[in-house]
Image: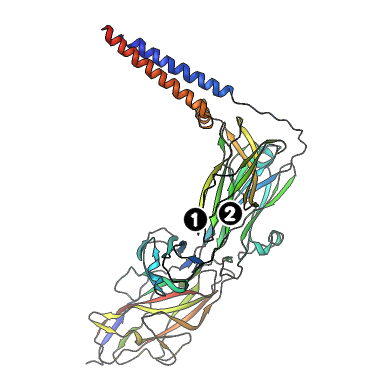
Amino acid sequence: MLAAGLFFLVPSNAARAAFGISPPFLNADHLVQGTKYEQVVYLVQDQPDEDVHIQANLQMDQPASSWVSLDSGFNFVIPKGTSQFPVTITIAVPQNASLGIYHGNLTFVTVPASAGQVTIALGAQVAINLTVGTGIYEKYSVPIISFPDIYEGQSPTVHVKFQNDGNVPEAFDSATYQLYDQYDAVRLAYVQKNDGFPSTPPFTIQDYNIGFPVDFFLGVGQYWGLVTFYKNGQAVASQKTVFNVLQATPWEIALQFLEDHWIAELIVLALVAAAAVFFMRKKRKSARVR
Amino acid sequence: MSRKTPWVVSTLAVVAVGTLGFMMFALANTQNLTSSVTVGTAVPSIPTITVNHGSAITLTANATHNVDVNATITDGSGCTQITGGTTTVLLYRSGVTSSTCFTTANPLDCYSATSFTTSSCLSGTEVTTTTFALQYFAQATDSSSSYSGQTWMATVDFTASGGATGTADSAAGVTLNTLTAINVTTSSINYGTISASSTTGSADQVTTTTNAGNSSTSLQLYASATLTSSPNVIATSSQGYSTAPFTYPGASVALTSAAVTVSGFTLTSPTSTTNVQAPVYWGLGVPNGTPTGTYTGTNVFQALFSQ
């Protein structure tokens, strides 16, 4: 009877899709106690024709496994139509963490949608290597400096993308801004700024704008700007390019003027207050006459 | 008209006069700076070039992924010089250098285009976008790659309609991330019908695994769900695999429920769209006493980065 027992494994005709991960490693070599480290990995596929269920599994030296979390959770769905799905891995090192080196891996496996068939699931792995130490590690870069267009009367503005790969907060110390005419021939203004630079936390990327006020009205047209950022007395990033000053309504000009001149702002407030008092008095007087 | 209307009108008049006075004051305090310059033959310049909006590049498995190169092109002679001009835009791994890339395009490390898109030209300045379709095997430059320390950069070479030329490189390149990915070209392992107490013998089933990324890749195998025909199961170790044909069990390795790296199996990084692939051979032994039924299970093929 047993020898006559048969079984079948049913083939699936479903088309296969490529599946993988980028990057397949997380190397955080300069962690210190209390640090929070984040890295985005992308689960990628070439045929996102249907929802894909994903099961993540973490294997890590203890106690570091409790430091790791995923913004997606460990069971999630990549929606149909998504060829690159970002997962943010966060490493939160406790204040009382033991100094040392911790290894592990994080796997992501597709959960086959079809039941009742023999299926092949695809998986990808992120190797995790953490080093918790005590030393200060400084590393940063400025991959983007751009000059957005502004409206007439506004101050020139510089957009910065600051990437801090170190384990301490970083910020510029100072900056210089030179404004030139549309031919890049005549310097119209020179501005030095020594404060007001946002601090970028460790292991993060931050985008922000920095204004460089000039003491004259910047009219419609095209200008060149040259900005240089300094840290510890050294020039660390610089960019020269053109930007446009666009036409603004009188009301926008007035608002910008108020922003730049607090005395004018006070005068307007006083005028409004005087008008209110005047109106109240007249109202009371007319009430007495009645 | 009510009796209080004149007061309302008076109040509004005061506010209006005040506001008007303020705006006149504001406008009177503005200065319009004028400048003049003698302009000769203008040369186009490209003051800014940005790759992938300043972010690292992530490729897509077994497919192309679009990467933008944005450039600002200016020409003091006006927009007609730009709109009537010609351009070559390069996107390349920095170790290749622009001079090499100008002459030899290669999907591994150098892409070239001769056009861009733009919304409008204003005062002799145009912001352009060129989109490149990077192949999944374009070379990585991140910390664990063979080209660590390099970046992907762009160079724009522009010739205005008047013949003047300008060339510039992107001030900063971006990292291209390692992609570890595979594609198994078969969706199932079909052992067919086998009696209890017998095996697949030399009738191996074959799965073909293809490298769908830009790194060398090892393969890990395991069963996430053992063969089951509820309530009966066939032990996971009854499945065996090998990188070479075998007669069960022969030289096959017994499948496990924990991931095991397949010995001798490495897919090198592709250098073109020609597949880099390798087979795995599968066999099965059905233990004596296994009840008749339709057994199903799941085997996991896991890509493992190996540079």
Task: Find residue B270 and report its horizontal and vertical position in percent.
Answer: 56, 71
> Disc 1 or disc 2, which is closer to the eye?
1
Marks 1/2 in contact by CB < 8 Å: the verdict is no
Task: Find residue B136 and report its horizontal and vertical position in percent.
Answer: 54, 65
Q: In the image, are marks 1 and 2 on the same chain? A: yes
Q: Is residue A253 above or below residue B185?
A: above
Task: Find residue B198 and report its horizontal and vertical position in percent.
Answer: 32, 92
Name the secondary structure under disc 1.
loop
Q: Which residue is mark 2?
A: A143
Q: Is residue A248 left or right of residue A43?
A: right
Please name whichever residue, B86 or A250, is drawn nearer the observer in this view of the structure. Answer: A250
Q: Residue at x 36, y 10 (%)?
A: B6
Q: Is residue B282 above or below residue B126?
A: below
For residue B130, say whether it is visible. Answer: no
Label 2 packing within 10 angstroms: few (<14), some (14-19), many (20+): many
Q: Residue at x 67, y 47 (%)?
A: B46
Q: Which residue is mark 1?
A: A201
Q: Residue at x 43, y 61 (%)?
A: A88
For residue A154, say whether it is visible. Answer: yes
Quadrant (top left, top right, bottom left, bottom right) of the C terminus of chain A:
top left
Quadrant (top left, top right, bottom left, bottom right) of the N terminus of chain A:
bottom left
Q: Is residue A155 above or below residue B107?
A: above
Label 1 packing within 10 angstroms: few (<14), some (14-19), many (20+): many
Mark 1 residue type: Pro
Q: Mark 1 vs mark 2: which is more N-terminal?
A: 2
What is the number of the mark on residue A225?
none
Name the secondary structure under disc 2.
strand
Mark 2 residue type: Pro
Task: Find residue A93 and report its horizontal and vertical position in percent.
Answer: 43, 65
